[in-house]
Image (cartoon, grey):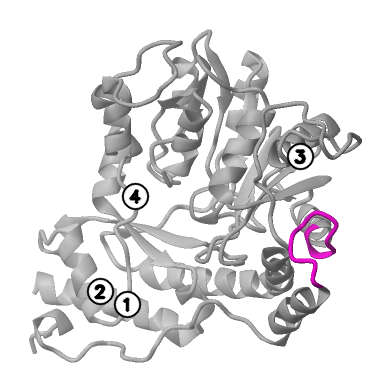
Amino acid sequence: MAVKLAVDGGTPVRTKPWPAWPIWGAEEEEAVLDVLRSGQWWGIGGRYVPKFEEAFAASQDAKHAVCVTNGTAALEVALRGLGIGCGDEVIVPPYTFIATASSVLAVSATPVFVDIEPHSFNIDPAAIEAAITPRTRAIIPVHIGGRPADMDGVLDIARRHGLIVIEDAAQAHAAEWRGRKVGALGDCGTFSFQASKNVNAGEGGAIVCDDETVYDKVWSVHNVGRTRSGKWYEHHVLGGNFRMTEWQAAIAMAQLGRLPQQTEVRTRNAERLTGLLSGITGIMAPPPDPRITRHAYHLYTLRYDADAFGGHSRDEFLAAMGAEGIPVSSGYVPLYKEVVFARRSAGEGAWCRSGAKMDYTKVQCPVCEQLCADGVWIFQTQLLGDGADMDDIAEAVGRIQSAWTQ
């Protein structure tokens, strides 16, 4: 009997709603009311910001944390604090949220894109060395979807060339590389607490590090150029008001308490889903890496082979999955194709005029472009369901393949 898909008018695999996000309860409510009643709503002199900074640093195996307004600001503050600016080059992957590269532009430096690994969606260390020039100052590896990048490869290259490493860990709360949490594996790491993230404060971000000098530098930038030992109206460096408020810190503190249990649920469901999908030709999950001792699973990423689905495109597959009640996404586009980089190449706008001219219209990262054409995302909120929810995802994939290959 022919399978009739929901996209063609059939009955969908699933009509039940997925777990709601954010998940909150008495802890968040009491924390916000505590801030309200205290009358101390900003972080300077507050209780929740320093408390959360200490707790978050410890949760990521780091000695220090500086909380800021959002994950984008965290990257900019880290770059400014580490002295990266006009004429400098920073190596970044093209498969990431725009902030990874736009933060480099924001400090008047130049993003240099290198390709990614086809199996991990992360920066390819083998592609980094060829992109290094005398102007290169830093590398920003991104832990996409909560899967740690190859930090052995990145750090080896950085040490040999004397480069700074800033980990973009916006999606990687609780992720581990060789048994140690990401973030302070390099010189520093940045995190986001934006509404979609696994620790959700609506907005917010943090920089973590082990080095006291780095801590002092980023603290100064985030607090209008002040120093921790200086006077209130004493400003040593060019900084800004990037401070987190007590509201965000209070919510983030409560959310952080939920992270270990939620990470276990995501991991258990991801493992189940991987087992279910492994028998379906044309659906490829990133292979395991024994150096990754914890995947944060902000995203569950897949690659789709149209040939195994009767030649139907990835976009047709996404639409069919959505009709079956399974929300999925195509993910990112190559960052160098964004209009802002074309404008940078053309010199349209207030850009740093120093350094090598970069024509982003001629950048080619073939692995990234192929992955952007066949990649599929499943979201962390879906992984907070149960085993039956994972069964629904796999059933929908199998049903679509059966319908398209009969």
Work out whether 230 lies above or below 164: below
- Mark 4: which amino acid? Tyr
Give the CA separation, mark 2 to mark 1. Answer: 5 Å
Q: Earlier in the sequence, mark 3 or mark 2?
A: 3
Task: For the residues labelled 2 and 1, say whether their Cβ atoms are less than 8 Å apart.
Answer: yes
The image's mark for residue 332 is 4
- Mark 1: which amino acid? Ile
Q: Position of residue 282 (x, y in %)?
A: 26, 59
* Numbered range of the magenta stretch: 39-49
Work out whether 393 lies above or below 349: below
Helix, strand or loop for disc 4: loop
Tally of numbered discs:
4
Q: Earlier in the sequence, mark 1 or mark 4?
A: 1
Q: Residues within 10 Å of mark 1 (few under 14, many from 20)?
A: many
- Magenta-highlighted stretch: main secondary structure? loop
Q: Is residue 252 left or right of residue 18?
A: right
Give the CA separation, mark 3 to mark 2. Answer: 45 Å
